[in-house]
Each structure stands twice: as structure tokens, then as C-alpha cells.
Amino acid sequence: QLQAFGGGLVQPGGSLRLSCAASGSIRRIGDMDWYRQAPGNQRELIARATNDGRTNYVDSVKGRFTISRNYAENTVSLQMNSLKPEDTAVYYCSAHILLQGSSAYYAHWGQGTQVTVSS
């Protein structure tokens, strides 16, 4: 399972850090991602940390958000700087996980955490 931490209320221009930890009978983890969903919008992928160390970002967060993984601890974090009101959304972590005894990776989701950027 995945459990997300962080989030909250921050003023425009401020920073927040989200973290997500995977636990359970994990054999291997593939990509680890952060998504967000604003009211009335679809959930969108905003950052990805691949198993081979690459990172990808949606244009709207490039240069402001940084995704990082701790491969030993099965965690992924999202450092969010220069936050804007349009970053307000529920943020979700996701990971493709190969469980012990399984032969396929499946997507797992953490519970959402609210990020509100407002003065």
C-alpha cells in the first residue's frame, strides 16, 4: 500500500513537500508518480521518477517541482516551490509495484492529500 504525507495551506510563492511511502510484500517497484486533481478537472500526471533514475514533469510544474526517490526505503517525495493558486488540488502518489509471489506490476495509489495555495 501507499501512504502519502504532507500537504496543507500555503501562501502563493511558498513551498510544501509531499512524501509517499510504499509498504507491504514488495518485490520491486517500477515508476513512482505524483498526480493531482483540481475541482472539476481530470486527474493529471505531473511528475514521474522512473526505476532507472529518470524524472519527467508536466510543463506547468517544470522548474518549480522536484520529484525524488529513496530506492532503499521505497519512498517518493515531491518538493513544491514557488507555488501558485492554480496548483491547488488533491495530490496523489502512485507506484507500479511487483508484489511478492506475483508476475506482473500493478498500479497502486495512495490516499489523496489536499494542497491549497491561497493568501
Image: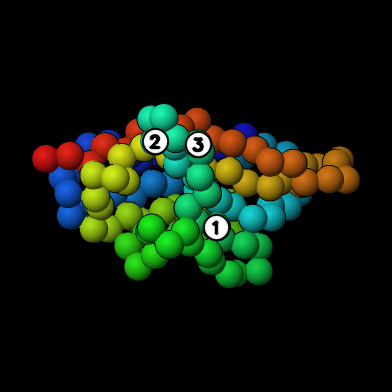
Q: Position of residue 81 (x, y in %)?
A: 27, 58
Q: Which mark is residue 22?
A: none
Q: Position of residue 70 (x, y in %)?
A: 53, 59
Image quarter of residue 31: bottom right
Callout 2 crowding tier (Cα within 10 Å): few <14, some 14–19, many ≥20: some
Q: Earlier in the sequence, mark 2 or mark 1?
A: 2
The answer to whether residue 86 is seen in the rendering is yes
Work out which quarter of the rendered image holds the C terminus and state it.
top left
Q: Earlier in the sequence, mark 3 or mark 1?
A: 3
Q: Nearer the viewer, residue 72 or 33?
A: 33
Image quarter of residue 23: top right
The answer to whether residue 106 is left or right of residue 81 is right
Q: Nearer the viewer, residue 4 or 24?
A: 4
Q: Give the alpha-carbon distance from disc 3 to disc 1, as whole Å.
A: 17 Å
Q: Residue at x 32, y 46 (%)?
A: 87
Residue holding disc 3: 42
The answer to whether residue 78 is left or right of residue 81 is right
Q: Which mark is residue 48?
A: 1
Q: Amino acid at mark 3?
A: Gln
Q: Position of residue 84 (x, y in %)?
A: 24, 50
Q: Amino acid at mark 2?
A: Ala
Work out which quarter of the rendered image holds the N terminus and state it.
top right
Q: Residue at x 38, y 30 (%)?
A: 39
Q: Amino acid at mark 1?
A: Arg
Asked which secondary structure carries label 2, the reply is loop
Q: Which mark is residue 38?
A: 2
Q: Residue at x 53, y 64 (%)?
A: 56
